[in-house]
Image: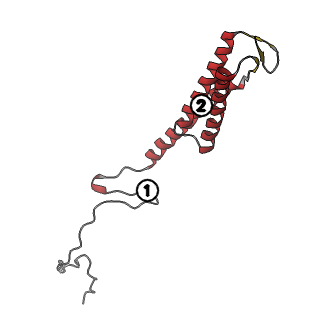
Amino acid sequence: MIFAQPALALGEMSDSTFLAYVGALAFSGLLLLIVAALPGQSVGARLLSVVIALAMLGYAFYLFFIFDGGEVRIFFYVFIVPVLVVINAIKAFAARRKAKQEAAAAVPQQAAFGGGAAPQGYQAQGFQAPEYQGQGYQGQGYQAQGQPQQPNQ
């Protein structure tokens, strides 16, 4: 006979309910591990998810393999925490995706062959025309590139 002790009541638990609780613990723990491995969450959120997941998996392992009767504590937040973590992961993923889209929209489109203005803080990458070292057409005030202007006399 297995006694369950939830937060508010003390009662007897059937074997099928016990196995369902152990299965739910294991499922919740695995779900939290998967969510912790997904990108988009901070390191602290991932670490918290891993710690809670290992606690759930450890308790499920204990109940299934080591426990041999007596009193079982049922933690209802075991089923609430994974739902909240999944919701948080979805929000973080959506925020990360939106930030990427906004960043892509903020970069101005470059003209063909590297022309156009670069975003602030970046240098434009393109081809520069080679400097002409010869004599330019000097008859009408034009000077070859790279040579100093001579005042007209």
50 to the left or right of 38: right
Where in the figure is residue 77, as x and y percent of width and height?
71, 26
19 up-or-down from 82: above or below = above
Q: In the rendered image, which quarter contains the C terminus? A: bottom left
Q: Is residue 149 left or right of residue 14?
A: left
* Callout 1 secondary element: loop
Q: Indicate the position of residue 60 as horizontal and vertical percent values.
A: 65, 24
Corner quadrant of residue 113:
bottom left
- How packed is label 2: few (under 14 Cα within 10 Å), some, or many (20 or more)? many
CB-based contact (under 8 Å), mark 2 and mark 1: no
Instruction: Tell me residue 1's x, y (percent).
Output: 75, 10
Residue 66 occupies quadrant: top right
The image's mark for residue 119 is: 1
Among numbered discs 2 and 1, the one appearing first in the sequence? 2
Q: Is residue 98 above or below residue 20?
A: below
Residue for point 71% across, 9% down: 14
Q: Residue at x 43, y 60 (%)?
A: 122
Task: Report the residue that reaches farthest toward the bottom.
Answer: 153
Of tags 2 and 1, the one toward the viewer is 2
Query: Looking at the rendered structure, which numbered label has been put on residue 50?
Result: none
Disc 2 marks a residue whose amino acid type is Leu
Q: Spatial distance from mark 2 to mark 1, Cα to Cα?
A: 40 Å
Q: At 48% across and 43% down in the image, what residue appears? A: 100
In the rendered structure, find residue 32 and report the number of the disc placed on it: 2
Please give the count of numbered marks on the rendered protein.
2
Colour style of the rendered protein structure: secondary structure
Identity, as a three-letter code, of the amino acid under mark 1? Pro
Q: Position of residue 87 (x, y in %)?
A: 60, 30
Q: Is residue 11 above or below residue 32?
A: above
